[in-house]
Amino acid sequence: MTDKADVWQGTLALMILKTLETLGPLHGYGIARRIEQISGGLLSLNYGTVYPALLKLEQEGSIESEWGVSDNNRKAKYYKLTRAGGKQLEREARDWQQAQAILAKFLSAEPST
Amino acid sequence: MSFAKWLRAGLRRVLGLFRKTQRDAEFTAELESHLQLHMEDNLHRGMTLEAARRDALIKLGGVEQTKENYREQRSLAFLETLFRDVRFSLRSLGKRPGFSLLGVLTLALAIGVNTSIFSIAHSVLFTPLPFPQPERLVSLWERNLSADFPGPNVVSGGVFDDWQRRATSFAQMALIGEDSANLSGDGGSLPEAIGTRLCSFNLFPMLGVQPIYGRQFSAEDDRAGTSGTAMLSYSLWKRRYAGDPDTIGRKILLDAKPYTIIGVLPSWFDYPDTRVQIWLPVRHEVSPGDIQNRGNHRFFVTARLKAGVSVTQADSELDAIQQRTHQQFPDSLVGKDAMAVPLTETIVRDVKSSLYVLLGAVGCVLLIACLNVANLFVARGASRTREMAVRAALGGNRWRLIREQLTETALLAFSGGALGTFLAYATIRWVVAFRENLPRASSIHVDGAGLLYAFSVTLLSAVLAGFLPAFSATRHHLLEPLRDNSRSMAGGRARTRLRRVLLTSEVALTVVLLIGAGLLLKSFAELRSAKMGCATNNVLTMGLSLPEAKYEKPSQKVEFFDRLLTEVRAMPGVRAAGFVTVLPGNGHWEDNTFHIAGRGPLPPGESLDAVLRAADPRYFSAMNIPLLRGRYFTDAERLENAKAAIISQSMAEKFFPREDPLGKTLIIDWAGSPRFEIVGIVGDVLSDLNRPTEPIMYFPLGFGRFGSGSLIVRSSMEVTSFALPIQKEIAAIDSDLPVSDVLTMEQIIGRSTAAAAFDAALLLVFAVLALILAAVGLYGLLSFVVTQRTNEIGIRMALGAQRSEVMRATVLDGLRPTALGLIIGLLGGFATAYILRTLLFGVRPFEFLIFAAVGMLVLIISLGACTYPAWRAARVDPIVALRYE
């Protein structure tokens, strides 16, 4: 990958869910930072895009939000995974891995003689 | 995504439409905290405060943009704009309550009448019959019996047998005959005369109808000489036998003959009409000789096509069979050909054209209403020209402005539509209750199709009424209206032209409607005043039918009538009384072929035929039917001495064109070929008000062949007061003899013209509605023009124009579109008249009087609508006008 990849919506949601599972309740900024860090700078992410994605997940009942106080005493809105969200993450991660495995096999197949 | 989740998300987004300010504030706070967190991180990394903030903003990707994306996710964007438009429109409509109310009411009326007439037409014409595979049911007719009867004709039993033997297109074929009977009183109930139908036993299986109690007719029941069986209609069973299942197996007396009740039909079964109360097997009722006769036309034939056979195929097969029969039996009066038509068509034949005319009329009303509402909006748009221009200049896009306009008309249309649907429910009830002779009335209601239609009509009117004004209001070049001050008169000219076009169409449509209504009304008036040819005032009639079983011998019948008439004539107050087999205005009913003695044989396949009546000697004078020549029957002409005949004037003209009919002898084609000498010629009477005069021949009631007909009583007193005493008199002679249809002649005429009256009245209501709408439109247009030109008028008057001149100019201005519309409308009226011609009676389609009257009416109404605005124009005070902005 030469250019930084844009994040598409579906994967962004999955990344958010995974982040929340790993790190527990977190604010939007933290989530955005984490996604960028994990990708090792390969992803170009406008931090602003996580907010509509968060809202969408919240509307679907996968996450909940609550105002809280950050480590350095700032008011911030914290998001956390719901049980439905946990299940969704489990399912989507499995689907994703499956798809990836299939594609990997497909791409590594030897040209038949 | 699972449905539950999708629903949940959707619901949240709908909720997101509310408490927007609060939600916006919350997100602003969240973003603010985001930026702060990011800046703190950046500061830790050693950025300056300014660089930290800048970096945070850049990484975020723009605060406003983020907010916008967030908002989009939060709620449903299109709903939000829609809500905004609706709110805006509601405010704008609310500011002019009169205007809005007028619009809503106009559209409600139009949508209401459209929905109701559509629902009626749809239920009557297009709802399938309630039988299995109704598309395979057809009715069969003989055709082209003679030059006098070229149309479809009822079928004779003999011809039916031929068809049944030869035709291969039909799975089943059933006979239905019309009849009536006296149901004797039993167990405390009174005797009554009821409508019966005779049918071949396979009718019910063919239709696919099962009795709810008991069994159907079997082949055993349907033959001469077996014991009588009867099936009851649901309503008779409920009414007379209290819905008792034990009615099955009970014995009843019909025309004094015993029958066993074997079955009860379901309540929904109303074929062929709701008057049928008892069904009897036809071959048990009609003698084998009569039913095998090819020339005795009296049956309706209903058949079920075999699977895969089309109506056209069946029709041509039947036609071919009939042509052969006709060649084979040139001496019988049989149809030269035959036809098969879908059963639905037969049932609705009489109302089809009425319904289509009404549909057309309400369509016109809808168009007029839409034009009117469009007109109102165009006028209002004019007063908002500047607002629109300013908004356009500030970057409001045109589509947005159009959408607002459409939202407004849509709001009006949907309020109107909702109101109109309620109106439709009420209208349908009313129509079903008051329109006589509406077949399949029980199937009429506002159903899914009706509601869908109401919705489509609503949508259509929203678009029709909205688009024109929307485009006209937003069409202007940006700067023109802004430059346009009240002193330049160019403003609004295009709009005025548009309004004139709308108005012209409105007037044209109104004229068309009025002409249609006028023609139908005139036709109805002709019907009402049609020369019955007999007394119609103070005449009471009642039906009687002597049961053949009890009055078998001619002398018994004759004695009964003698006694009855003597008793009735002796009652104080009775001026005259008589008896006739079929009353004028009660229908064609009976005709017969005959020969004229002394003339050579007729060419094969031809025969003489005339309507047949029997009357007592004093019937003619009692009914004021004038004796033109010769004499009436005498009391001595009874039984074997009854050898006289009286013919009507048109019969004399038709069959004895160049000779004197008096003294000629008619030989009637009955058993024994009885001969009757023509002794008198009387004036014509109409047998059916809706049909032209038919030739009639009268025979003496005393001949003893006739047992059913109507007693007529004329008095100078209130005739209805005789109904009870006469019935008592009849009961005294025969306590088991019921009386039916106690009616005055006026009621009989009213009954047979009721449907025509109803249609004409309904159309008139629509036309008046249209006229009012058009007048309102005209008035609105002129008021608008006058307001717009107040300034110009002021200048003219300041320069010395006379008030009368201003007034004349304004009136002419208003009359121009009227005149044009009138001309177009009159042309349209010709087309309408052409379409309506089959519905008209005694009116030429291009009746000058009606066209002239409609023209005058529209002109006068328009003049009225123009006068007030013109008067206002003439009263403009130049000083005020010049200052008018």
Image: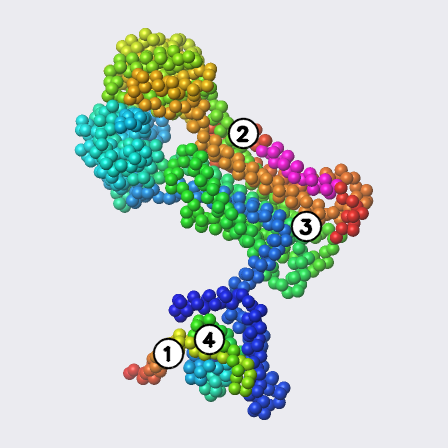
Mark 1 neighbour class, 10 Å CA radius: few under 14, some 14 to 19, many 20 or more: some
- Precedes in sequence: disc 3 or disc 2: 3
Determine contact: label 1, label 2, CB under 8 Å.
Answer: no
- The image position of residue B8, as x and y in percent, is 44, 67
Which residue is depicted at the point 32% across and 43% down?
A: B130
Distance from label 3 to label 2 (Cα)? 39 Å
Badge 2 amino acid: Glu
The answer to whether residue B286 is magenta is no
Q: Which mark is residue A90?
A: 1
Residue extent of the magenta highlight:
B854-874
Report which quarter residue B481 is drawn in. bottom right
Which residue is depicted at the point 29% across and 20% down?
A: B735
Query: Where does label 2 land, which residue?
Result: B847
Query: Where does label 3 land, which residue?
Result: B493
Instruction: Give SS at disc 4.
Output: strand
Badge 1 amino acid: Glu
